[in-house]
Amino acid sequence: MSPRPRAPRLYEIDVVRILTFACVIAVHTTSHTVAADDVGLYAFLGLVHFTREVFFALSGFVLVHSYLARPVPMRTFWPRRFLLVGVPYLVWSAIYFAASNLHSPKGTALDMLVRFLQHVVTGTSWYHLYFLLVTMQVYLLVPVIVWLVRRTRGHHGVLLAAAGAFQLLLTAYYAYLPLPAWLSGYSKVYFFSYLFFILLGAVSADHSTALFGWVRGHRPLIGFITLATGLLTLAVFAFQHFVLGFSLYHSGTPLQPILMVWSAAVGLAFLAIGSYWADRRRAGSLSARGVDVASDRSFGIFLSHPLILWVLLWVGDDWLPRTVAKPWLTLVAYVVVVVGSVILTELARRSPLSLALTGRPSARRKRPLTPAQADAGAVPPD
């Protein structure tokens, strides 16, 4: 029996992935180093909060694109993906839970075990791990998503309009109304908070050829749309803070209607940058190898960078915050966190613990990755 054809490698998506993860690090370093009254940095933080939506659009795209090219039974599909994401999720949840209790453990061993399990269920062992929890929810929904994409062909515009209206109303509820207990503090861990972007990625995968062709032919227009949408996002931020009296953070909170519009524009802009890169990519060149490696390491960097940030800011009696003045602290922290997480990920990728720590087999293995190992979805590179 001949092997099933694989989905062609989309180098455009590698660039989108790298840019998105770079901005995730910007979100976390900024939010942990910004001065309480720094309007400029809080406005910047509001702008880079698009990462959640772009991330889940990327997940929907890669999952559906690879599945449509190589349909596999769910009994094969689910174990593969839960191995490459679920195992690192549990391992890093344990690492971050231990870090949070390092100096002052609370309760008995049984109490701590119960709290750890609660954190695992809710994706709250550390502030970034809910990304993986939502991703695993999307994995469970892949049969429904693929069915929906196929069933609504010819009506994808209606599907996205309905999903967009739902998410706009939902994010308005999140941003402007009091939430019930089951949502307060947990709205970010449910897949339906990102439903439009998940479906946007899935539908885009079904039209990838036409989409990429349109993007290549309209890069100036995409640049204009992104600029205009960014200015509108800043205007909403200013209105909410200076007129409505919202806090600086709340004015740029990720789950609000304007961030949906901005996230869609940024995702399109990243795809335009990715297509520009892919059109000029020379196989085997230093830059091509660099992007390939960065894409491969991106998941490990995402998992480990908060640990570097935690060590940087809180170990050594807060030496760095006391030494570097704000707002320069944000820039310094970003550079150090990127470098530190790259080094840590590179070490992990070359160790026997690579799968558990980075979601990828060890880089020391001599055999190349099989298609099953390579097509892991949007969190580990495709």
Image: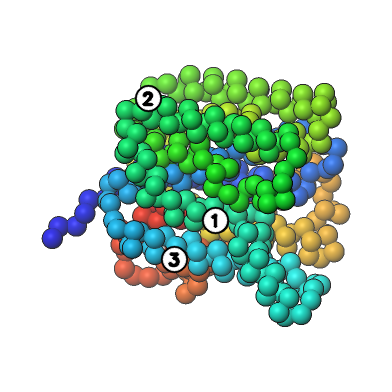
Q: Residue at x 44, y 65 (%)?
A: 83
Residue that badge 1 annotates = 132
Residue 107, picture quadrant: bottom right
Q: Residue at x 60, y 62 (%)?
A: 121
Q: Position of residue 109 (x, y in %)?
A: 72, 80
- Separation of residues labelled 2 and 1 (CA atoms): 31 Å
- Separation of residues labelled 2 and 3 (CA atoms): 36 Å
Figure label count: 3
Q: Nearer the viewer, residue 330 or 72?
A: 72
Q: Secondary structure at mark 1?
A: helix
Res 56 label = none
Q: Can residue 227 be seen at all in this image of the molecule?
A: yes
* Disc on the earlier residue, 2 or 3: 3
Residue that badge 3 annotates = 83
Q: Residue at x 73, y 63 (%)?
A: 311
Q: Nearer the viewer, residue 129 or 185?
A: 185
Q: Position of residue 17 (x, y in %)?
A: 49, 45
Q: Can residue 259 be seen at all in this image of the molecule?
A: no
Q: Position of residue 100 (x, y in %)?
A: 74, 67
Q: Position of residue 12 (x, y in %)?
A: 41, 39
Protein image colouring? rainbow
Q: Residue furthest front?
A: 180
Badge nearest the viewer, 2 or 1:
1
Res 214 label = 2
